[in-house]
Image: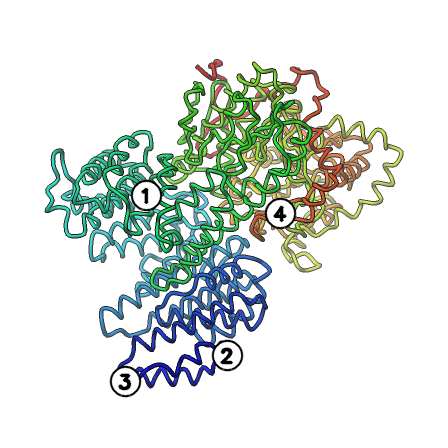
């Protein structure tokens, strides 16, 4: 009996499904299973391909999903065009609504396919239905967990499905994190219980390590514990997995998982590393027999698989040894791997050995691994191909990768094995080729049921979005040619697409129009466009993505001296340049807290990478200064994050060694819009640009130069009352998370106490808090205090036994994750002194600023825009951070010493403010909301908050309009770079604050002290 009856049905996408299924059942009973499967798969592939070509947003998408789900149920590969179309729908906003609707219908028909669970969960999560997405995955997990299996194959399939579902949950939680939310199963967890960085050892009641003994070992449960910051319970689950693991490989996987960090950081990971080290040492005797000493390797040790299992296990060990700083074991394993790689019988692992060794230390292992790969011959298997490209990327053997890729079979070229070749293409500036390759890879991953991993596919979609942005950026960037005899040079060093979005790229195009060369220092982010002058062109792409100078040019760069990181102490210096504050800033932002534990092993590795970027950046900067100086070429280096690493090294170097006219730091920033928009929009529509070498008093380019503001205000003084009337309601904008019109009961009780205090002749001061982990200042401290923590505790001590009632008002943004981003420490956690009876800590949402107008007599601020709002209400304030009076030059008080501050807080000395304080505050708002400081600019999406709302993208209508007719605002921003500063060339010096004579010892309990002034050290040999 033949299948000829199916031929007519194959030709029609609308063939009756019931008829087809009946025929399949009939033929299946007759033993023609393979023919039935192939014929059915052919029909489904045809449907999927047709649906992929149809660009409608309803029925075609349903057909696409049905066909792909059917192919997965048969464990058959899907057509590439169909899976690429589905990837496109999942990745872009314009397909999300249609996919959300279609997936609901098809998921009901195919609820057990991992593809539909993944697609439906992503569609729900991206539509802000996070709880539904997580519940869907958890329901599916419960069903698979309860499923009974009769054979070993069925049990393996069940466990594989559970792993897939855990990965779908990871994707849902990653989307939730981007939206600054929690997936179901997440909570404030251990982090809230552990403000001192103890990894949450103080468990909540009923949540001991012994809880949930049965279910916590499931992959999704462990993932929920990790991402929910339930660190103690997560480590307990890892320990149980380690103890019950059937073999060494699984034990090593459990150890690796002990070291994983969630998307929302914990204060510290000492316990995780201690647990992993203990387990690592316990399993050491199981892998040491696999090591080989000097001499020939016994072929019997290789095994029938060519040594693949042995080498992969040793690589697991090596990666753990590197992470746990087990240097002796690392050396032993690396030596053994080199010996395995030299054995002809182990050719199938040669590329794997070469790749993993180069990943550790390219300079040390380049020669030895080159010998291994030259003897290995052409790769044949997918893992060999993947490792070939990985090795070639690290060894800079792009020629070898290119030669193989051009002759490789088509299935290999679009498999996941080619992922590292996309990296090579990007580094060479072939953004479009890299993009097309990754689209093919993502489609192949999605359409191969036996190899599909949801989290891998999600990662590919994110990379595709980044490469789309880089491709578009390269296209627009090339529309203006690089000048061949430049009048000046602007250097920049974005390391990836996300960082590139922080730069005003239309301004870079304008600079090229004006005859200035734009030099990207890091390869693979912007096109390499030479000027024709080798002295300048040597800096184009000289910094490699793998954190080193291009070997072909490195000999031309003199190494720097005096670069001294002491990360465990929170210190980083380069000669007499002190970068310890930016180092703290990075640690605080990473751990979402003020008190940073610099001894945490995982934080040291994170900061160590940034420190090495800083060293590399400093090397290029110093050499560029000398080279361009000899050419008498004006040069600015543009940075978006001048208070963080590695960008901060540019500001500090240029302040100390540069020149405001000839070699200077340019700070490019978003406009200060959040205050005015109150976080009502996602993207910035303004840009700030300043030469901060000429204006070192500025904390950021988005704030005014005080002299310019005063001149602007003086010319408009007569209009001051009118400006005040127009902005008086600014203080009434709701910025807290309170949803009720009336304050809560505790706030009402506080108000009553304030009235009673004042009725008895007392005074009321209010200390306004900050989100503690983001100072955004290149240096910290003020004339009376060393830092925020010192200020807070000194304020409390200052009012003790006084007639001052002190309110401490934490910042309302502490409760808004899209701004504060999952804090692990809050303002009140910085208080180390006993609270006297005359101090009240208010809730974050008790009062908006306007509700305090009748309650307080004096505002106390470290720094913050509250200074302006208090000014509008004619309430005097004391501004305590060095940069506060510069940010808000409206006439408030700055303390001159610790003693002076105490007198102000106790109302022993009057806080004398400008007589026209309210009008100055109103003028500041007008000045900042206009285009005097920050200038209208959009062009590409620059997020206003930490919330990730979309992949990076250009606004095509903006950039095409600029290229047609220009933009006066872009020209104004460019003039701030091109025009020489108005200050004398070398008059601008970095602000140097003398330590207050009465200052107490350092109060910042973050395991670092500011290093004493050292004797100047030459920065280069």
State whether residue 329 is above or below residue 736: above
Q: Does the CB distance between marks 3 and 1 fall below 8 Å?
A: no
Determine whether, in the image, residue 717 is placed left or right of residue 282.
right
Q: Which residue is disc 1 drawn over?
A: 388
Q: Which numbered mark, 2 or 4, is in the foreground of this view?
A: 2
Q: Does the CB distance between marks 2 and 3 fall below 8 Å?
A: no
Q: Does the CB distance between marks 1 and 4 fall below 8 Å?
A: no
Find residue 6 and report its horizontal and vertical position in percent: 40, 81
State whether residue 910 is above or below residue 87: above
Q: Which numbered mark, 2 or 1, is in the foreground of this view?
A: 2
Measure how far apart labels 3 and 1 are at the Cα level: 47 Å
Find residue 102 and report its horizontal and vertical position in percent: 54, 71
Precedes in sequence: disc 3 or disc 4: 3
Q: Which residue is disc 2 drawn over?
A: 14
Identify the residue shown where x is 32% and y is 43%.
388
Find residue 1013 and report its horizontal and vertical position in percent: 50, 18
Measure how far apart labels 2 and 4 are at the Cα level: 40 Å
Q: Which numbered mark, 3 or 1, is in the foreground of this view?
A: 3
Q: Which residue is disc 4 drawn over?
A: 954
Label 2 neighbour load within 10 Å: few <14, some 14-19, many 20+: few
Rendered image: mark on residue 30: 3
């Amino acid at each position: 009996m033949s299948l000829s009856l199916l031929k007519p049905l194959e030709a029609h996408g609308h063939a009756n499904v019931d008829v087809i299924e009946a025929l399949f059942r009939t033929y299946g009973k007759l033993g023609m299973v393979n023919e039935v499967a192939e014929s059915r798969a052919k029909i489904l592939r045809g449907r999927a391909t047709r649906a992929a070509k149809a660009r409608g947003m309803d029925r075609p998408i349903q057909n696409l999903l049905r066909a792909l789900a059917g192919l997965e149920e048969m464990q058959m590969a899907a057509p590439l065009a169909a899976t690429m179309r589905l990837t496109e729908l999942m990745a872009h906003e314009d397909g999300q609504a249609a996919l959300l609707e279609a997936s609901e219908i098809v998921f009901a028909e195919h609820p057990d396919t991992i593809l539909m669970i993944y697609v439906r969960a992503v569609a729900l999560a991206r539509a802000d239905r996070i709880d539904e997405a997580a519940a869907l995955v958890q329901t599916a997990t419960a069903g698979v967990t309860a499923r009974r299996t009769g054979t070993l194959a069925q049990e393996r399939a069940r466990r594989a499905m559970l792993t897939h579902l855990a990965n779908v949950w990871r994707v849902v939680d990653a989307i939730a994190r981007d939206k600054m939310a929690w997936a179901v199963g997440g909570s404030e967890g251990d982090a809230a219980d552990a403000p001192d960085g103890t990894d949450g050892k103080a468990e909540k009641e009923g949540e001991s390590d012994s809880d949930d003994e049965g279910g916590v070992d499931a992959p999704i449960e462990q993932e929920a514990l990790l991402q929910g910051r339930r660190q103690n319970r997560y480590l307990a689950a890892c320990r149980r997995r380690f103890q019950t693991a059937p073999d060494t490989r699984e034990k090593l996987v459990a150890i690796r998982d002990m070291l994983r960090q969630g998307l929302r950081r914990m204060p510290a990971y000492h316990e995780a590393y201690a647990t992993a080290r203990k387990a690592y040492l316990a399993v050491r005797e199981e892998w040491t027999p696999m090591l080989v000493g000097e001499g020939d390797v016994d072929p019997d040790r290789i095994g029938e698989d060519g040594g693949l299992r042995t080498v992969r296990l040793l690589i697991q060990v090596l990666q753990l040894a590197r992470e746990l700083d087990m240097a002796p074991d690392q050396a032993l394993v690396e030596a053994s791997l080199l010996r395995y790689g030299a054995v002809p019988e182990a050719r199938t692992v040669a590329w794997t050995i070469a790749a993993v060794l180069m990943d550790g230390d390219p300079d040390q292992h380049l020669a030895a691994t080159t010998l291994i790969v030259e003897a290995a011959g052409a790769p044949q298997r997918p893992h060999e191909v993947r490792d070939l490209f990985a090795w070639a990327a690290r060894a800079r053997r792009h020629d070898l990768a290119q030669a193989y890729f051009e002759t490789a079979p088509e299935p290999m070229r679009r498999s996941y094995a080619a992922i590292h070749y996309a990296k090579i293409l990007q580094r060479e500036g072939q953004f479009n080729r890299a993009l097309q390759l990754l689209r093919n890879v993502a489609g192949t991953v999605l359409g191969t049921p036996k190899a599909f991993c949801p989290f891998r596919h999600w990662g590919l979609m994110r990379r595709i979005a980044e490469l789309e942005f880089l491709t578009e950026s390269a296209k627009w960037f090339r529309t203006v040619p690089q000048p061949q005899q430049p009048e000046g040079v602007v250097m920049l060093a974005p390391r990836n697409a996300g960082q590139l979005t922080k730069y005003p790229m239309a301004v870079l195009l304008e600079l090229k129009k004006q005859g200035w060369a734009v030099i990207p220092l890091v390869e693979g982010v912007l096109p390499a466009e030479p000027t024709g002058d080798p002295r300048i062109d040597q800096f184009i792409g000289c910094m490699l993505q793998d954190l080193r100078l291009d070997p072909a040019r490195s000999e031309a760069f003199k190494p720097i001296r005096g670069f001294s990181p002491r990360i465990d102490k929170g210190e980083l210096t380069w000669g007499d340049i002190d970068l310890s504050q930016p180092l703290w800033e990075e640690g605080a932002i990473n751990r979402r807290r003020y008190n940073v534990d610099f001894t945490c092993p995982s934080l040291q590795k994170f900061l160590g990478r940034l420190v090495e970027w800083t060293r590399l950046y400093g090397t290029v900067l110093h050499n560029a200064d000398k080279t361009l100086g000899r050419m008498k070429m004006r040069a600015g280096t543009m940075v978006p994050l001048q208070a963080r690493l590695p960008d901060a090294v540019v500001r500090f170097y240029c302040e100390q060694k540069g020149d405001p006219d000839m070699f200077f730091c340019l700070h490019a920033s978003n406009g200060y819009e959040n205050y005015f928009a109150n976080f009502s929009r996602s993207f910035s529509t303004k840009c700030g640009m300043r030469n901060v070498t000429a204006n070192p008093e500025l904390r950021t380019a988005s704030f005014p130069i005080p002299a310019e503001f005063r001149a602007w205000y003086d010319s408009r003084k007569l209009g001051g009352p009118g400006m005040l009337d127009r902005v008086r309601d600014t203080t009434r904008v709701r910025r807290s998370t309170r949803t009720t019109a009336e304050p809560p009961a505790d706030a009402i009780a506080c108000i009553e106490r304030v009235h009673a205090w004042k009725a008895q002749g007392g005074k009321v001061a209010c200390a306004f808090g900050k989100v503690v982990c983001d100072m955004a200042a290149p240096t910290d401290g003020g004339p009376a205090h060393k830092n925020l923590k010192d200020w807070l505790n000194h304020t409390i001590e200052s009012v003790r036994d006084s007639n001052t009632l002190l309110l401490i008002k934490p910042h309302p943004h502490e409760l808004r994750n899209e701004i504060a981003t999952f804090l692990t420490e809050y303002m009140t956690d910085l208080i180390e002194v006993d609270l006297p009876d005359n101090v009240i800590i208010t809730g974050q949402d008790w009062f908006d600023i306007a509700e305090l107008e009748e309650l307080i007599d004096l505002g106390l601020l470290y720094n913050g825009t509250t200074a302006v709002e208090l000014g509008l209400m004619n309430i005097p304030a004391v501004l305590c951070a060095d940069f506060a009076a510069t940010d808000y030059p409206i006439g408030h008080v700055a303390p001159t010493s610790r003693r002076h501050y105490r007198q102000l807080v106790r109302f022993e000395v009057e806080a004398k403010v400008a007589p026209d304080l309210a009008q100055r505050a109103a003028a500041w708002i007008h000045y900042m909301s206009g285009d005097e400081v920050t200038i209208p600019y959009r062009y590409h999406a620059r997020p206003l908050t930490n919330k990730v709302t979309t992949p990076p993208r250009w606004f095509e209508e903006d950039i095409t309009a600029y290229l047609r007719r220009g933009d006066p605002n872009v020209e104004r921003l460019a003039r701030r770079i091109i025009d020489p500063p108005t200050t004398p060339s070398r008059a601008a010096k970095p602000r140097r604050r003398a330590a207050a004579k009465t200052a107490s010892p350092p109060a910042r309990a973050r395991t670092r002290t500011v290093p004493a002034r050292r004797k100047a050290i030459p920065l280069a040999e």
